[in-house]
Image (cartoon, rainbow, N blue to C red):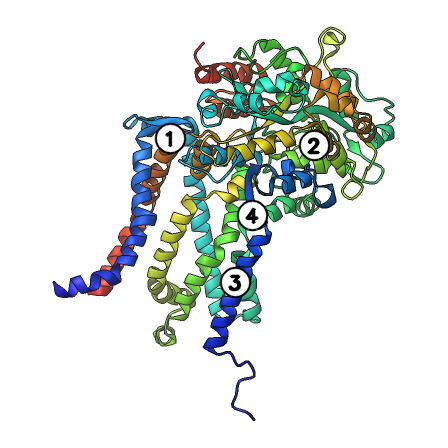
Amino acid sequence: MKTIAQAVPFLAPVQILILSVIVIPSLYVVWLSLNASTFGQSPTFVGLDNYVRTLTDPAFLHALWNTVLIVVFAVHLELALGLAMALLFASGLPFRRILLVAVLAPYAVSEVIAVAMWRFLFDPDVGPVTIALASLGLPTLDWSFEPSHALVMIGLLTIWLHLPFTFIILYAARLAIPKDLYEAARIDGATAFDAFRRVTMPLLGPAIVVALLFRYIFAFRIFSEVWLMTQGGPARSTEVVAVYLYQEAFRFNAFGTAAATAWIMVVASLLLAAGYVFLLRKQVVGNAH
Amino acid sequence: MSAKSPVNITRRHLLGTALGGAAFLAAGRSFAAGKTLNVLSHKVHQTVLGTGDGDLLKDWRSANDADITWSTFDSNPLQDRLFREASLNATEFNVGFMVDNRPTSQIAAMFEPLDDYLKKEPIEAFDDIAPGLVQGMTVDGKLIGIPVRHATQGLFYNEALLEEQGITAPPKTLEELVEQAQKLTFTSKNGTRVTGMVLASDLAVFPVMFARAFGGDFLTKKFELVPDPAAMEKGLTVLRNMFESGALPRSYATTKNDDQVTWLQQGRAAFTVLPFARFAQLNNPEQSKFPGKIKAIEFPVSAALQGKTPMASVVEAWGMVIPANSRDKDLSWKFIREVSSKRVTLGMANNGNGPVRVSTYKDKSFADKNPVAAVEAAALANARGAFPPFPEAARAQSIFLEEVQLAVLGRKPVNEAVASISSRIKPLLPPA
């Protein structure tokens, strides 16, 4: 007991920090989500009405669908690319250091700059990439007109921006696999594919789950790529949940529905990532034993 | 080799330097002005007041022993921040700039009524400020803001491109405008792909202008929603046909207000609709490939209305407000009085501000310096806001734009889009 009392002053700063920046704001958002509130108007208790309104709003459901599409496709494609690149780098690539810098560079670019750059490169009239694709007779991305093309463009942009994160986790994990295991596998007659299936993948498993979990959570709150590229248009067809929330809070000043949207986002992203959380927990418990 | 470090800093030196520095900084404050006025505005509001020798508030600062600290934002974030500040218990901001389609009864209640200030310390020739703009800042019978800037929309065209296509005069009717825009969708002699017209798709201004050219409207001051659906359909059909024929760019749905300026400056578009105050920027030799060649006229009405109904261009006005929870409101009022004076209004107008005083347009120096002054004054005489303020105005505008985009891009028949505008926005309007 005495030990706990002595430890409290040392732990207090962390607890206060968590309480003040996470717990109290979260509780405030819960309270806000149960009230109708805007500028110049006192909050009025409305129960779960904001949640019902949000969940029955076709614009929200469409935004949720777009978000799930982007998360599922972009995150898994990014993982496949990150894994392929990690294995390529680990196999001994020439000019590895320079190539590493090139691969990691997008992570150092501000999202705003990245979107401005991509908008210019893929401009439907004068974009160098559009012109190059057209001159090669290849189809171009009509992202400013076709919603499906716009979603593809947003997906590609988010993969380009976040690939370094997935890559670095997988690359570090791959380098940590002892060479002896590959040697043993080779002596046992394993082909390169067998070694990948029986050695690399099982040992990369925990790193893959961590990368996927983080990327699921990050990708679910995707905002700047969409907002700066299309602002959710044309006609709200590329809107994602975070953009919907922004519109409710800062354009329509409907703080109640915005707060409800925020909590729905938290629950939806947890549900989407639940499988991976379960896997991670299983691995942690397994390692502990 | 000496063991002593070449940079020999002792604790005593460090402490001494720190104390000395702090004392110097503290002394520095004594040379600064005694008071600070914090202003929340758009960058353009600060820019038009000038800097250095051209600072229009130079004398005011020294007379009131006050410094002005500006915090500037883009329009929507600015309004959000202003309302957020005004809803707190107290704010550091003394003066804010508010656009005239935002002050609802609830919003107006967060700002200081200015009628008593006006009686106590009147603004120079207050009657000279356009009464329509003053009315826009009067809510529930209380004056909550003093108009400071208006942005009246006009039709800009690139005279060089018109000449290149053998067009000798700008359009006089909307039909002529469409015809010319289609003719001006071509590749110019210098190899630039020109689009007839460029418009941003995220502002209600443009579809409203096209509807008004046929005598229609989006939402009137009396909250009549789409009072003439046929006129709205005609306006949207024109935009739809222009998009289909390429006279509006393929990137219409992602075009922003700033794109309109750069497209016109670079000769990528022949026509656009922008506030007259953009005239100087569009013709700025440092930015524009066509300085002196970009002209402006009033937006034309359709042939059927020509000579019968004048064009009601869209005007957006800004007013200066004092948050009710701010400090030193007397200093705020002194600032507002000075900015509203005839001298500063003229100075700001010369710097590209839409002047709110009728007398400014009559001033010879302004007319000489600003070739579009006369046409702007004429357009302003019949201009009105895109829609009146009401609590769900932002959501209503968003729905309107969504339906307009669907119609223009060909994803929804125009008549269905117009019907949806009415049915979806009606529940958002204030009760009659």
Mark 4 residue type: Val
Mark 1 residue type: Thr
Residue drawn where x is 50% and y is 23% of the image: B113
Q: Are marks 4 and 1 on the same chain?
A: yes
Q: From where the camera sits, is residue B198 visible? A: yes
In the picture of the structure, the residue carrying the numbered disc 4 is A112
Q: Residues within 10 Å of mark 1 (few under 14, many from 20)?
A: many
- Image depth: mark 3 or mark 1 in front: 3
In the picture, the quarter occupied by the N terminus of chain B is bottom right
Q: Are marks 3 and 4 on the same chain?
A: no
In the picture of the structure, the residue carrying the numbered disc 1 is A257
- Residue B258 shown left or right of residue A183 in the figure: right
Mark 3 residue type: Ala
Residue drawn where x is 16% and y is 62% of the image: A4
Q: Residues within 10 Å of mark 3 (few under 14, many from 20)?
A: few
Q: Position of residue B313 (x, y in %)?
A: 67, 19
- Image depth: mark 2 or mark 3 in front: 3
